[in-house]
Image (cartoon, rainbow, N blue to C red):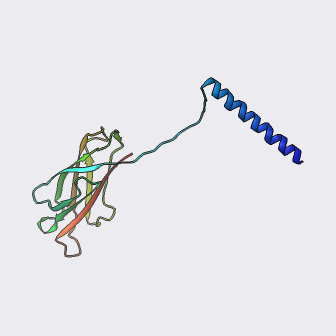
């Protein structure tokens, strides 16, 4: 029983040595298989374009998340407020399947619509994101500003 294991191990080592020796002499090793690679590029916000009466503050230029605070005291219900932000691809690779993530924690009394000018952004290129926020009803809390955070990703 023990001799069979030793013989089997020596046989496997011999086969392996023959394969490595052949590869060394022929300078070629062929492997077959499948490689899967998925990436998620993070894009950055750039050049916020304020629309009159829309924002009281914004932050996030040059980062992957962008927060805008809208003055609710100057805002009527069912009145859409629209602003645009450029999104830059700072990487050396094309960014495809570009999407804008709307705030998951946005209050229910707002409708948020986003549009991006291109679903692919070339390396070093940019696209324009248009955001339209409509206040369907006044917030229940006495808020002077309502913050919204957006993120743009590509994969």
Task: Find residue 118 and report its horizontal and vertical position in percent.
Answer: 28, 41
Q: Which quadrant holds residue 79? A: bottom left
Residue, x 75% and y 33% (percent of image)?
15
Residue farthest toward the top in the current orientation of the protein: 26
How many numbered marks are there?
0
Is 10 placed left or right of 67 in the picture?
right
Q: Quadrant of the C terminus?
A: top left
- Which residue appears at 42% of the width and 45% of the height? 39
Q: Position of residue 136 (x, y in %)?
A: 22, 64
In the rendered image, residue 91, in percent from the top left (x then y), is placed at 32, 43
Side of 131 relative to 10 (left or right): left
- Relative to 114, say whether 8 is above or below: above
**Picture coordinates of residue 69, whole percent (x, y):** 19, 63
Nearer to us in this view, 139 or 43: 43
Residue occupying image coordinates x 27% and y 54%: 63
Q: Who is closer to the viewer here, 108 or 130?
A: 130
Residue 151 in which image quadrant: bottom left
Left or right placement of residue 101 versus residue 48 in this view: right
State the residue at coordinates (72%, 30%). Answer: 18
Residue 16's place in the image compared with 153, above or below, is above
Asked if 118 appears above or below 70 in the picture, the reply is above
Q: Residue furthest left?
A: 52
């Amino acid at each position: 029983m023990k001799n069979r294991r030793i013989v089997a191990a020596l046989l496997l080592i011999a086969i392996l040595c023959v394969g490595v020796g052949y590869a060394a002499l022929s300078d070629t090793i062929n492997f077959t298989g499948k490689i899967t690679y998925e990436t998620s590029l993070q894009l950055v916000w750039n050049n916020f374009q304020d629309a009159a009466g829309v924002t009281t503050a914004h932050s996030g230029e040059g980062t992957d998340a962008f927060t805008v605070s809208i003055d609710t005291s100057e805002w009527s219900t069912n009145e859409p407020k629209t602003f645009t932000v450029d999104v830059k691809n700072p990487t050396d690779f094309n960014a495809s399947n570009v999407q804008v993530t709307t705030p998951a924690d946005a209050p229910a009394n707002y409708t948020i619509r986003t549009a991006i000018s291109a679903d692919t952004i070339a390396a070093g290129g940019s696209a324009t994101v248009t955001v339209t926020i409509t206040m369907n009803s006044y917030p229940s809390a006495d808020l002077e500003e309502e913050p919204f955070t957006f993120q743009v990703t590509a994969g």
